[in-house]
Image (cartoon, rainbow, N blue to C red):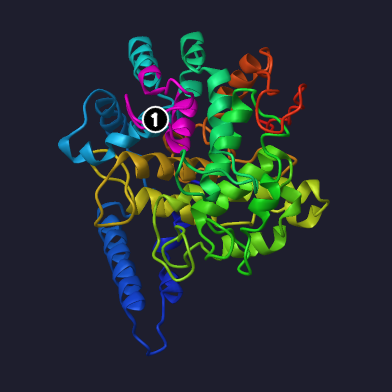
Amino acid sequence: MDGSPAALRCLDAGHAAERFTDEAVETVTSAEQKKVEQSIEEVINVYKQMHSSSQPTLMREQHYQYLKKGLRHLSDAYECLDASRPWLCFWILHSLELLEEPIPPAVASDVCQFLSRCQSPSGGFAGGPGQHAHLAPTYAAVNALCIIGTDEAYAVIDREKLLDFLWSVKQPNGSFVMHVGGEVDVRSAYCAASVASLTNIITTKLFEDTTNWILRCQNWEGGLSGVPGLEAHGGYTFCGTAALVILGKEHMLDLKALLRWVVSRQMRFEGGFQGRCNKLVDGCYSFWQAGLLPLLHRALFKEGELELSRQRWMFEQQALQEYILLCCQNPTGGLLDKPGKSRDFYHTCYCLSGLSVAQHFGNMDIHHETVLGKEENRLAPTHPVYNICPEKVAHALQHFLRLPVPNDSRRPGASADPEPSPPAEP
């Protein structure tokens, strides 16, 4: 833990040298970058005036009240997320578990009953009751139920039909569509691999050729794109890498090129991460980008890159914590993209997830914490593959591994005795 006032990197006088320079060629992008840096400088100056000798503080109680209210009531502004309701459950529940705030049993049961109504009769989960099954809310629903972690929660998941749904969206080239008749991108491969491994329905046949398809998404930049041939993107890079970790094939990536790309996405002045080259900082990439680094750390260690994997230098953990605590907190609760933006449950979840990664990231030999500020700023750790707390992953695996893998023989091209793939290690 580092609690000294001198630790505030962004308050140091020399930090101004890290500002963006357009080399006298102004563009729309460079003008927006300068605006963001100016807004962050204003936040820092206000903070220095009000807190000359103290560290930034995580506003735990305000965030808790914001999240607790969201579980029971949402404003009209959330009407546009009617097809993402399991996501709202996951974002809120995961934020609460990171804050180590217990879910009241009655609330947990209500969430289970609601998610059961989102489960499609043909398998998988929809964005809301009566809607069509979709891989994204399926991932969110399974994660939310694993966070609750009760027998009632686990019993909601119809594993036989979930496997049917995954086969219905599997494509001959190894990719997955997000829903029947929907689009293909690397998110769908991750969502499928995540729910299949957590619920013990993963089989080699189900993910045949998926590894090769994901590998084709790694481009010349080093990161991964949504589909082969496009620009590298933080969210897609996380999804592709995490899916390969689940499938035990992450070593097939160009790990050093991927490392070079992701560490270059941390902004020099802001301390947070951008999602793509030449884009603005965004609080949600605190997880999508920083969450990649523990996965890379482990992969490099397994590949014998001991000098790389022994280091804790892979990103500026303290700088990321400063960005989140100084620039992404709404004083009345909830977290946001950047100064001037509105709070929402999505950014609350992924800013807190990134803060957790920054606090708990360590080397392979010891668990090392780097918590900026007081002990009260410390969050629970999150599993970098599934983005739920590690003990919830372990508990879910323990529960579902006691159950047999559903019979796969009736599915296209499947053998009578499916060979399961190992789940990602907690």
200, 12: nearer the viewer: 200
Identify the residue at horizontal 45%, vertical 38% (top origin): 136
Compared with 387, 104 (above or below) is above
Q: Which residues are magenta?
A: 116-144
Which is more toward the observer, 415 or 374? 415
In the image, residue 252 lies at what x, y percent?
75, 53
Side of 52 where 367 appears, left or right:
right
Which residue sits furthest right? Answer: 304
297 sits left or right of 231 in the view: right
Task: Judge from the rendering whether residue 148 lies leftward or rightward of residue 44; answer left or right.
Answer: right
Which residue shows up at 60% across the image and 49% down it? 240
Q: Quadrant of residue 28?
A: bottom left
Q: Secondary structure at mark 1?
A: loop
Marker count (numbered) = 1
* Residue 172 image point, x, y percent: 64, 45
How many C-alpha atoms fall within 10 Å of the one at disc 1: few (<14), some, or many (≥20)?
many
In the image: residue 36, left or right of residue 94: left
- Single out the residue that lies furthest toward the left: 76
Does 234 appear above or below 257?
Answer: above
Picture coordinates of residue 6, whole percent (x, y): 46, 57
Say above or below: 88 vs 308: above
Q: Which residue is mark 1?
A: 126
Q: Can see residue 57? A: no
In x, y percent, where is residue 22? Answer: 40, 83
In the picture, which quadrant includes the C terminus? top right
Q: Magenta stretch: residue 20 in it?
A: no
- Residue 127 drawn in magenta: yes
Q: Quadrant of the N terminus?
A: top right
Amino acid carrying mark 1 in the image? Ala
